[in-house]
Image (cartoon, rainbow, N blue to C red):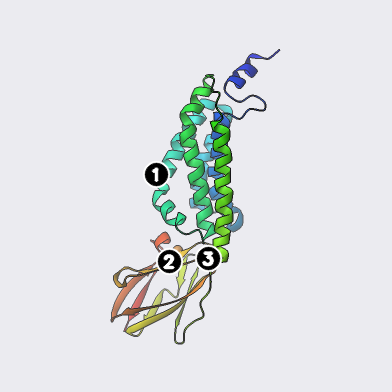
């Protein structure tokens, strides 16, 4: 004989051998949370990433102990993170050659989208309404497939990144620990030649708005860049890490 709780669980698609909307919600939360956790496992604690993960983890705990509250919480938090991360998302998804940016953002986006889609049906099934649909299972498999493909594709793209050799007379610039070294670069007017190496695991850019210079440098990559500049003083910066990652180019 089934207990009342078991009957209710089965109706909510949570019975043994069944994967329902609430299960999909939990999986979506786990995928979202794993996105920012992954780089922390490799690189150590990062407050900004921890702030992204914390509300999702709270939602997963709520999902376990106060199901309906957890569903609403995860839905709202996921939507907020999708909106908040939209500018970074577009930028990161255009650069698969940088796995440390591409993979976490893909996981946050895929998990977040699934959680948002699943919120209403999960809430209804937590109320005990029966939903006989294969959608949760299909969405789970599709979501995991997208994440696995993103990881594989990103690593493959990273493997094709090539390094330039420094041109004669190039000024050497390093990107390390999210800073430029040196922060002050002095060059002669005419053609400015820089040999830039990114020693971080994240993608950086060398961007000078006034001169129309905007170069993306993949993790571990060395790139030779040249551009024309008249005498003057120009701010250079990294687009994903501005403000903070910047310097001054003086052309004499
Ligand atoms: Cu940067």
Q: Secondary structure at mark 3?
A: loop
Which of the marked residues, 3 or 2, is nearer the chain's N terminus? 2
Rendered view: 32 above or below 197: above
Give the residue drawn at x 59%, y 49%: 148
Q: Would the CB of label 2 be found within 8 Å of ligand 1? A: yes
Name the residue tied to disc 2: 205
* Circle 2/circle 1 CB separation < 8 Å: no
Q: Position of residue 52 (x, y in %)?
A: 49, 46
Give the residue drawn at x 31%, y 68%: 209
Residue closest to the eye, 145 or 241: 145
Q: Quadrant of residue 31?
A: top right
Residue closest to the eye, 180 or 216: 216
Rendered view: 94 above or below 197: above
Quarter of the picture containing the N terminus is: top right
Q: Would the CB of label 1 be found within 8 Å of ligand 1? A: no
Name the residue tied to disc 3: 219
């Amino acid at each position: 004989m089934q207990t009342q709780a078991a009957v209710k669980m089965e109706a909510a698609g949570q019975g043994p051998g069944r994967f329902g909307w609430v299960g999909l919600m939990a999986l979506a939360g786990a995928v979202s949370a794993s996105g920012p956790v992954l780089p922390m496992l490799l690189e150590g604690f990062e407050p900004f990433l921890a702030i992204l993960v914390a509300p999702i983890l709270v939602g997963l705990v709520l999902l376990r102990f106060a199901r309906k509250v957890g569903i609403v919480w995860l839905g709202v938090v996921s939507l907020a993170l999708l909106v908040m991360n939209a500018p970074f998302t577009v930028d990161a998804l255009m650069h698969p050659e940088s796995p440390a940016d591409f993979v976490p953002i893909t996981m946050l986006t895929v998990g977040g989208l699934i959680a948002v889609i699943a919120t209403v049906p999960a809430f209804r099934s937590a109320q005990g309404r029966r939903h006989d649909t294969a959608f949760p299972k299909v969405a789970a498999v599709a979501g995991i497939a997208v994440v696995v493909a993103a990881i594989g594709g990103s690593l493959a793209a990273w493997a094709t990144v090539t390094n330039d050799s420094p041109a004669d007379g190039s000024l050497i610039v390093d990107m390390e620990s999210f800073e430029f070294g040196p922060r002050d670069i002095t060059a002669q007017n005419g053609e400015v030649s820089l040999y830039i190496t990114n020693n971080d695991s994240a993608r950086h850019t060398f961007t000078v708005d006034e001169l129309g210079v905007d170069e993306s440098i993949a993790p571990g990559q060395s790139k030779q860049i040249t551009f024309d500049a008249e005498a003057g003083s120009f701010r250079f910066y990294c687009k994903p890490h501005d403000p903070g990652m910047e310097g001054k180019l003086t052309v004499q």
